[in-house]
Amino acid sequence: MAKTKVEDSKDRKKELKEREKVKKEQEARLKKRLKAEKKKIDRIVSFPFKSLFFIGSVSGIVYCIYNHFGEGNTILASLLKGFLLFVLVYFGLGLLLLLWFFVLAKIRQKEAEEKRRYEEELARERERAALEGKLERELLLKQAQEKREEELRKLRESIGNENEIPRANTE
């Protein structure tokens, strides 16, 4: 018996170690997934800013090169004009994107509000149908009880007063 207790405790310790190992592996996988999701969200958030910067930079550099070599302006004037174009493109497109996202958010908000209203109306309709079904069942039950009472009364009349059937409780 002593051996079985020792073996049982060893088996339990092994089982506990295995459970802890599995739990640690699950936590590690969860942390890895969370880290990947965080990176994905960071990339999504930074994408518009990186894109704006890239587009503004390319347009400013191309205009600066064109202005210096094509029109023959000095390098400082070309750089200044290129920088101004970069600023205009960066903030202009940024403002347009901001307005676009604002309009898109309003549209989605209206759709969500309409969906919520529709679901509330559907819930009210279901509740009304359930209530009507309940009332209809109660009406059918009441009619069935009245019909039963009527049949019992007719049966009593046909048998006569000698073998009276006790009246059933209708409540």
Image (cartoon, rainbow, N blue to C red):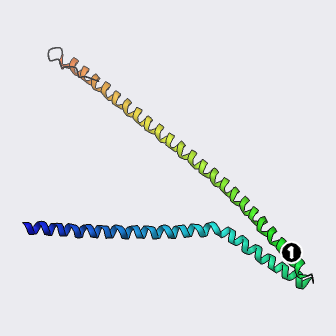
Q: Is residue 86 left or right of residue 143?
A: right
- The residue pinned by badge 1 equals 80
Query: How far from the left and from the top, in percent, is residue 151?
Result: 26, 24
Q: Pick out the residue farthest to the top.
A: 161
Question: Which quarter of the rendered picture does the N terminus lie within?
Answer: bottom left
Secondary structure type for disc 1: helix
**Amino acid type, callout 1:** Leu
Quadrant of residue 81 in the image? bottom right
Using the image as rendered, state which of residue 2 and residue 155 is in the foreground: 2
Question: Which quarter of the rendered picture does the C terminus lie within?
Answer: top left
Using the image as rendered, state which of residue 30 and residue 3 is in the foreground: 3
Quadrant of residue 4 in the image? bottom left
Query: How far from the left and from the top, in percent, is residue 52?
Result: 72, 70
Quadrant of residue 83 in the image? bottom right
Using the image as rendered, state which of residue 39 and residue 141 is in the foreground: 39
Q: Is residue 19 left or right of residue 8?
A: right
Q: Pick out the residue farthest to the bottom.
A: 69
Query: How far from the left and from the top, in percent, is residue 10?
Result: 18, 69
Instruction: Examine the rendered structure and indicate whether residue 13 appears above or below residue 139.
Output: below
Query: How far from the left and from the top, in percent, is residue 119?
Result: 53, 46
Instruction: Examine the rendered structure and indicate whether residue 101 appears above or below residue 114.
Output: below
| Residue located at (17% from left, 14% from top) | 161
Total marks shown come to 1
| Residue located at (90% from left, 84% from top) | 70
| Residue located at (40% from left, 67% from top) | 27
Q: Is residue 1 left or right of residue 22?
A: left
Q: Residues within 10 Å of mark 1 (few under 14, many from 20)?
A: few
